[in-house]
Structure formats: C-alpha cells, structure tokens
Amino acid sequence: MDLNQLTIWEAHEGLKAKKFSSEDLTNACIKRARERNPEVNAFVEITEDFALEQARLVDKDGAAGPLSGIPIGIKDLFSVKGYETTAGSKILKGYKPPFDATAVAKLREAGAVFLGRTNMDEFACGSSTEHSCYGNTKNPCDLERVPGGSSGGSAAAVADMMCIGAIGTDTGGSIRQPVSLCGSTGLKPTYGRVSRFGVIAMASSWDTVGPFGKDVKDLALMLQVMAGNDKRDSTTPERPVPDYMAALDKNVKGLKIGIPKEYFGEGVEDETRDMVMNAVRSLEKQGAILQEVSLPMTKYALAVYYVSMPAELSANLARYDGIRFGIKPSEDGSDLEEYYRNVRGEGFGDEIKRRIMIGTYVLSAGYYDAYYKKAQEVRTKIIDDFNRVFEEVDVLCGPVSPYPAFKFGENLADPLKMYMADVLTIPASTAGLPAASVPCGMSSGGLPIGFQVIGRQFDEENVLRVGDSVCDMNKF
C-alpha cells in the first residue's frame, strides 16, 4: 500500500514506529496530487514548500499526537496566516489573512501538515462545486460527474488519496453530500461544537466546521483536536469535549435507531433506498433496535433554508466592497455606488448574485415578516419535531443524497433541481444536529452511495459509533 492510501491512525502508527517519516508521507501525497490534480482539480493550490517544512519539523521533534505529521487539505475559506484565502471567489483574489482560523490553529498546534487549499463552490454556495472561480472539481469515481458541494475539493482530495484527511464546512450538507458522492466519510458536528472564528461566513446561524476522512476513526481523531470552546466565537459552549475514540469501542447492541419515513419517500431513487435499508438491517443484526418514526415538518426544511440562508448570506457578503481587501474593478465608476456595482459585478459569480438578490428581497421592508420571520418560526417547529423523536430513539438513519453523483451541467439550468440535492441533509442543519455520512455500497453504475446518521445535539459519540459499524460492514 502506498503511504498516501493510509488512514490517519495507520499513518500515525507508522510514524510512531519510525517505519517512515512525515516527509515521506507528505511527499507521497504531493506525488499523488501532482499526478491527479490536473484532472480532478481538488486543490486550487498545493503548498508544497510549506507542507514539507512542517513535515520536517515534525520529523525533527518526533510525532506526538495522532495528527502530528499528517498531511491534510484545507477548504479555501479557512484563514491560514500568510496564505491566500479566497472562498472560491474572484472578489477575494490576493487576500492573505494575517491570522489563523481557530480550527486551523488547533490543527497546526497538533502538528498537522497543511498540504494546500481545496476547491469549493463560491462562498460555499452550491451542491456540485460547479460554482468556483477555479473551475469544476471532478468526482474521482467518474470524471464526468460532480463531486458534490460545496466542499467538493476536500471530499475528492481524500477519496482520491491526495491527502490523508481534510477539513471543510457544512451549512446545509456541504460535508455530508460530497463525501456521499465521492465515497469518503465526513461529519457535520453539532452547531457550535467547533469554532467558526476565522472561517469566511456564508450563513452564520447554519455554518458548521467538520472533518473529512477515509474512515470514521479519522473523523473522531480530527474532531477531538478541533472541538471546544472559543472565546472568539460566542456560539461555542463551555462544554467538555468527550473522548470520541472511546465511543468507537462500543457496539450498537441495544441502541434505538429511528428510521424517518420521510427520508425514504418520493424523489429517493430505489437503488439508494434499498442500499441504505440493507445497512440498517445489518445494524439490526448487530443488536440495534429499529423503530420507524415520522418527522412531518421535514418537508418544510428546504424552503426554510432557502429563505434563511440567502438572507444571512446577503448580509455577510455586504462587507465585500473592493476597498479594504480583494480585487479592484476594471473601472472605478463615477461615484461610490457605481464602484460597488462594478466590483461586485466582476467579483461575484452568477449563483452568488442569485442568492444575494433572494436574500435582500426576503429581508426588505414589507417582506421580512412574510418570509424571513415565517421561516424562523417554521425552523423552530422542525427543531421541536427532532426533539420529540429523540425522546424515543438514540439516532436517526437514512440516505444522504436522493441519488448518486450526477453529471456536470445536468442540474445547472434548473436551480430548484440543484437545491433538491440537499433535501435530506438540510433538516439536521436546520436543527443544528450532528450528522455523519459514511459509504454503504456502490450503485449498479459503480458510484458510491452514502448512509446518514443523525444524533441529538452534542451526541457525536453515538453518531460516530453507528457510522463506524456501518463502515466496517460495508467496506468496498
């Protein structure tokens, strides 16, 4: 097995036993990225010199924790001190943050090696990584198909063995959906479990930071490092971080698993439904207790998201004016208003402009109560729905995506069809719940199908525990 194919734990064990060095491991990832990235376009920048410098430092001092000397990819909206961060947008070209995001700082302190920036939909707006100023990322399982989004670069880089692990964000499904389509594993932690400080904002009451890995153990190791309170992010509670690895030592016997009937209904392809139910039945054979449940408010989650998210996005993107940082327009214009129009017209892509217009509309006088306020009220009812069900079961299981990876351009002409790609991931995001995606098999067309596990707030342990059991049963 080539070094770049190792999981985080396998790589850590090899480093600890001095079977190879971090420089060897990093060079193996760089070699793979050089070979494959021109085709896949998972990385928008491979920081070879920086990565090798970090690796040599680990080799000199010795690998300490499990992430020490491990090459990871970083989604292009995490601030990394002194390195360009653009959120996949022309408007931020040339911007180099003077500080690290908290998640990046924690990974740096743990000795992780930063391999480079991974591609993404512009400002994390998209489900296919077709909305990046750096061009499309391709699905390593089929280069004619999308990798999912918005963290498509991170998912593709891990699935294609260009890095050992990666980090990204999940606002409405941007970790879970791409790992489902690419065949890797990913976790959206509870909202606030990982600090968002230094992460370029999309929708502030939805954005969540999480890990990508080759198995569930990778996710537990990365979350262990990144989770915790941060005084610079008021949404992170002063709550102890449990031992996530210990949760993987437990089996699923006696665990109550809810099967939401709404997650297996209209729009979910038969093959996806059958594959997920096979995994569910495997959990039952291991002693889990299955119970069908209903989440009737689920049908409103997509509408809530596409009112609330663009509203928050439009407010967050108002700061990009081409004056303090980022690009300057080709023409200044005659006044400040025209300058803004020019810089935003040139800097923002079509999908961003669409969402800004929707968001500004629902926040405008006369429409705020009818749209934004109503969406917030329905969001509360969706949260109540989950709270009620979690009085009866420990976790919920279902598909991640209604279908496997689709072809490039297939949904671009129909934004509503594209938005439906997140119909099964958005409900958990609406309620701020932890949720993981793990592979549970391959379609007849040879494409990965993902299995979603949703837990109570701050119960990542049970989510990882169930995900690990599914992963072990369905290695492919």
Image: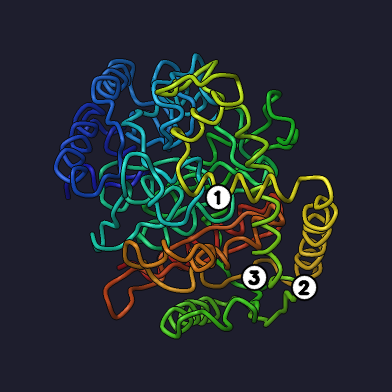
Q: Quadrant of residue 4?
A: top left
- Image mark count: 3
Q: Amino acid at mark 3?
A: Leu
Q: Is residue 223 left or right of residue 30?
A: right
Residue holding disc 2: 392
Q: Amino acid at mark 1?
A: Arg
Q: Nearer the viewer, residue 29 or 307?
A: 307
Mark 2 nearby-residue class (10 Å; few <14, some 14–19, many ≥20): few
Looking at the rendered image, the disc whose residue lies closer to the viewer, 1 or 2, is: 1
Q: Position of residue 241 (x, y in %)?
A: 65, 39
Q: Which residue is mark 1?
A: 354
Numbered disc 3: secondary structure: loop
CA distance for labels 2 and 3: 11 Å
Question: Residue 49 vs residue 62: left or right?
Answer: left
* Nearer-N-terminus badge (1/3): 3
Local SS, label 1: helix
Instruction: Give me the residue at 64% from left, 73% from top.
Output: 257
Q: Of the numbered discs in the image, which one, if any, rests on residue 255?
A: 3
